Amino acid sequence: MTQADSLDSRNDLWIRMQRIELIVLDVDGVLTNGQVIYGHPELEIKCFHVRDGSGLKIWRDQGKKVALISGRSSPSVDRRAHELGITPVLQGRGNKGPALQEIVQRTGVPTSQICAIGDDLPDLPVLRACGVSVAVADACSELRAMADHTTQAPGGSGAVRETIEWLLKAQGRWQAVIDSLNSIAG
């Protein structure tokens, strides 16, 4: 049984989860395991988990939005975001609070309807400002202590997909996703 399955429908968190329309993700340590591999000059390699990509596609297929905020800049992030249809993508943003406000302006989604997922201290202002905050399993202790939810999976290993399932279950949409996938297979 997941945390979403056991939440009381009158619970404040449960109500906030039902309102989420946009997920804002950090990249390094959330969509990746946080490691950066340098190859030839100018070549940077990041590993993205396909399960997270599948979860983000499911989320977007539900009419929901996704945005990325990263403290670093990397062409591989642009490529992955393009593959998944993610926009806006804000990179090289050391101060993520103003980046969140830019996302709110660009998407029209208020912070009360945003779920933020992070792993380290630079993500703290974003998680504090959003309606639902999630720390990945291997996040720093300060994020895990303040987050509404901590995933079982570490960053870069399906934590985003896990969060999407958690949110869609709270919104009563998960079974329809499963039924839809079963009808395609059947």
Image (cartoon, rainbow, N blue to C red):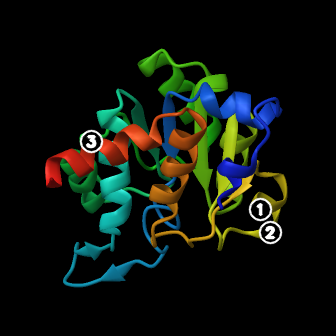
At label 2, the amino acid type is: Ser
Residue of label 1: 144
Looking at the image, can residue 130 be seen? no
Q: CA distance from mark 3 to mark 2?
A: 38 Å
**Which residue is at a point 76% across and 48% down the rendered structure image?**
148
Query: Disc 3 marks which amino acid?
Result: Ser
x%, y% of residue 35?
Answer: 45, 79
Residue occupying image coordinates x 52% and y 67%: 29
Front disc: 1 or 3? 3
Q: What residue does disc 2 label? A: 141
| Label 2 close to label 1 by CB (< 8 Å) | yes
Question: Vertically, is 97 above or below 154?
Answer: above
Q: CA distance from mark 1 to mark 3?
A: 34 Å
Tell me the distance, in whole angstroms, between the alpha carbons under discs 2 and 1.
Answer: 5 Å
Answer few, some or many: residues within 10 Å of disc 1's Cα (few below 14, many 20 plus, some between 14 and 19).
Answer: many
Disc 1 or 3, which lies upstream in sequence? 1
Among numbered discs 3 and 2, the one appearing first in the sequence: 2
In this rendering, position of residue 98 left or right of residue 181: right
Which label sits on residue 180? Answer: 3
Question: Would you say 124 lies left or right of 45 here?
Answer: right
* Residue in view at x 43 percent, y 43 percent: 175
Asked whether 12 or 141 is in front, the reply is 12
